Amino acid sequence: MLFLHYSLVVCVSLSFMHLTHKTTITDHARCQRQLITLLMACLARSAVEVYAHCYILKCPYHDSPYCSEIWLRDLMKGHPDRFCGQFGVHKHVFRCLVTELQALSMANSKHLTLDEHVAIFLYSAVSGLSVQLISECFQHSFSTISMLVLAIIIVW
């Protein structure tokens, strides 16, 4: 993006240099064509830089090494009160809920286990956090979190 600012400064400087010199009409038209060509080249380069920054040199948003599956497994192995504090239910109730949803034909999806799915739903219901904070905690996109919460509501 810094190139864009320098390019525009150079283009404006060149245009003032060309306009201040005494030139004939044909020289003036030639200078205008050169200036327009230079401006188009600067804009094209800037567009390429913006595209590369947005789509090629991407930096992952959800980059925590501690994914939801590991976090859920640690909570299941850990202290019962900690699990209940995070999800609002005891471990055996969580297991019963997962079993009941399996009976209603819910299954693991391509990227999520049913356990994670239920954990996301319960965590969002208990915590009242925004979708952005829940997606950060579970390391999934905003749309995935919204879709998962809605899917359990529809099944019930």
Image (spheres, rainbow, N blue to C red):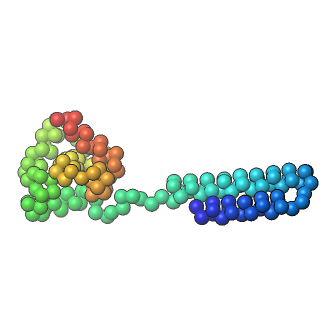
Can you give x and y, in whole percent of width and height, for residue 141 in the image?
A: 34, 50
Can you give x and y, in whole percent of width and height, for residue 134 in the image?
A: 27, 53
Specify the quadrant of the image occupied by residue 10: bottom right
Report the front residue among 10 and 94.
10
Examine the rendering and report whether any part of residue 4 can be seen. yes
Compared to 71, does 121 lie above or below?
A: above
Examine the rendering and report whether any part of residue 91 can be seen. no
Specify the quadrant of the image occupied by residue 18: bottom right
Can you give x and y, in whole percent of width and height, for residue 44 in the image?
A: 66, 53
Instruction: State how many labels appear.
Output: 0
Specify the quadrant of the image occupied by residue 38: bottom right
Judge from the rendering whether residue 122 lies leftward or rightward of residue 49; answer left or right.
Answer: left
Judge from the rendering whether residue 101 lies leftward or rightward of residue 37; answer left or right.
Answer: left
- Image quarter (top left, top right, bottom left or bottom right) of the N terminus: bottom right
Residue shown at 21% from the left, 51% from the top: 128
Judge from the rendering whether residue 111 lies leftward or rightward of residue 33; answer left or right.
Answer: left
Report the front residue among 89 and 126.
126
